[in-house]
Image (tube, rainbow, N blue to C red):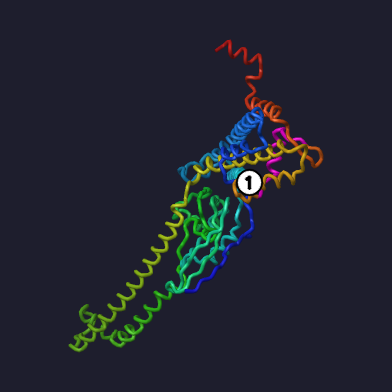
Amino acid sequence: MASSTEATDAFATDERDQFIPIRKTELVQALLSDCLVRAPALHEQFQQLCRLLSAIFHYEYFEALEKLRDDYHYFNPDLDSNTEANSPDLAAARAEFLETLDQVLKGANYKEISLEEIEKAHSDRPSLRVKVKATTENYHKVSFFRRGHRIEEVKHSRWAGLRTRIVRTRVFDNVIMMVTVKLPGELQSKRQAKALQVNQLRPGTILIKYFRQIALSDLHMLLPRVRVVMGTYDKMTIAVPALAGGIPLLLNAMPTLTVLFLVAGFYLGLTGPVEHEQVVKALAALSGVSALAGLVMRQRLKYERLSLKYQKQISDHCYYRNVSNNIGIFDFVVGAAEEQECKEAFLAYYFLMTSNGRVAQEEIDRRIEAWLQEKFKLDIDFEVDDALAKLDRLGLLLRDGNDLSVLPPDRALFVLDQRWDNFFPFANEPEIGQQAVMNA
């Protein structure tokens, strides 16, 4: 049995994720158990700081969640078709929604995959003999976003198991597909409008689907309304037996077809009487035509059986990996972005707080990545720029040229508490607060 190893990966094998795949609680516990935090007071202050940072990010992302829900109202395919009656400028509303969702996905450390990379990986995939095709002419845009990955080795048999090969492929932990259907004014023909109607897609809707554990080479299968196209091997298994059995039957039947028509005309009253031998030849021709029709029907059923088999493979492959759809995805995406923001801010603040004096950005990046590798065996490309930008926005970061530091925990808690109080400043107005208490 021969064996070979092949790689079908459009991405560099040494690419590192920016996604931190550990729970926020687990990360905080690991930081608190580190030897750099010993004093009980500092231990408690850092815990409270993490809690307050989480509350601030949660409130900020709650606004993003509400905006996504409102902006998606006119594009939700699960709503009835009368939704667009009182809609605003749909093109502008669509652009605003896509921009908001793109920002949230970036906050959750999702990266977009180009359709060219997906097409290339699909054409090179060895996992299934069947191919799928999907037309995208009815869509304004098709986008794929992925987060987290690993390399898997899958064994594939060839030549009835006489030869196997091990294929290395990249599998993504989280995949979000977004299909933006063209608006009514963007459809170029009645045929496109009819195709959308047949597929039960309302013009202008936006389909969003969230999948888990999807290989790069299988992303093409996630497109809506994919069509099964058989490979060369399956076409030959159907065509060769059809030709081998059909040609002899056709050659034998052709000389007697005229007799068959003559006898048929007699029984229909269209021709004169026929001889007994002609009737016998007609019956022989009829049996040959019946055999030929049976062969065609058998090969047709074989084609349909293979098509259903491959369609089931595609459905089974994607069905159990589909986690959520459309508006239900927003809670997950916003929650994921919120958690990633928290973890990045926790790490940046902690390692700046525990540094002896001021430290450069590159050094902080190196220390965090080394700590994640040592503590959790994670090879992460930490987004130090984004993490420091969050601390700077919240007023916790101190800069002295290229040297960085943070406010000590007690002062940082005061700053964050003020920021939290200013989200709803009504109780901070003494006169209004006193009057509200008196009228209660």
Q: Quadrant of residue 343?
A: top right
Residue at (55%, 50%) from the top-left corner? 183
Could you tell whether 79 is left or right of 279 in the image?
Answer: right
Q: Is residue 195 left or right of residue 102?
A: left
Q: Residue furthest top?
A: 438
**What residue did someone put label 1 on?**
372
- Of residue 392 and residue 297, the one placed in the foreground of this image is 392
Q: Is residue 141 above or below residue 412?
A: below
Q: Callout 1: few (<14), some (14-19), or many (20+) C-alpha neighbours within 10 Å?
A: some
Residue 284, image x, y percentages = 24, 84
Question: Toward which corner of the image does residue 291 lie, by quadrant?
Answer: bottom left
Image coordinates of residue 113 in percent, x first then y, are 60, 55
Q: In this rendering, is residue 102 above or below 281?
A: above
The count of marks equals: 1
Left or right for 31, reference 280: right
Residue 203 belongs to magenta span: no
Mark 1: which secondary structure? helix
Task: Where is residue 169? Give x, y as percent.
Answer: 55, 61
Give the x, y percent position of residue 155.
48, 65
Q: In this picture, which residue range is highlighted in magenta? A: 381-398
Name the residue rendered at 56%, 62% in the picture: 119
The amino acid type of the residue labelled 1 equals Leu
Of residues 9 and 120, the one drawn nearer to the viewer in this rendering: 9
Height in image: 26 above or below 165? above
Q: Is residue 390 magenta?
A: yes
Q: Is residue 19 visible?
A: yes
Which residue occupies the extreme left position in the image? 276
Q: Considering depth in this image, is 164 or 190 the residue closer to the camera?
A: 164
Decide if residue 260 is on the left or right side of residue 324: left
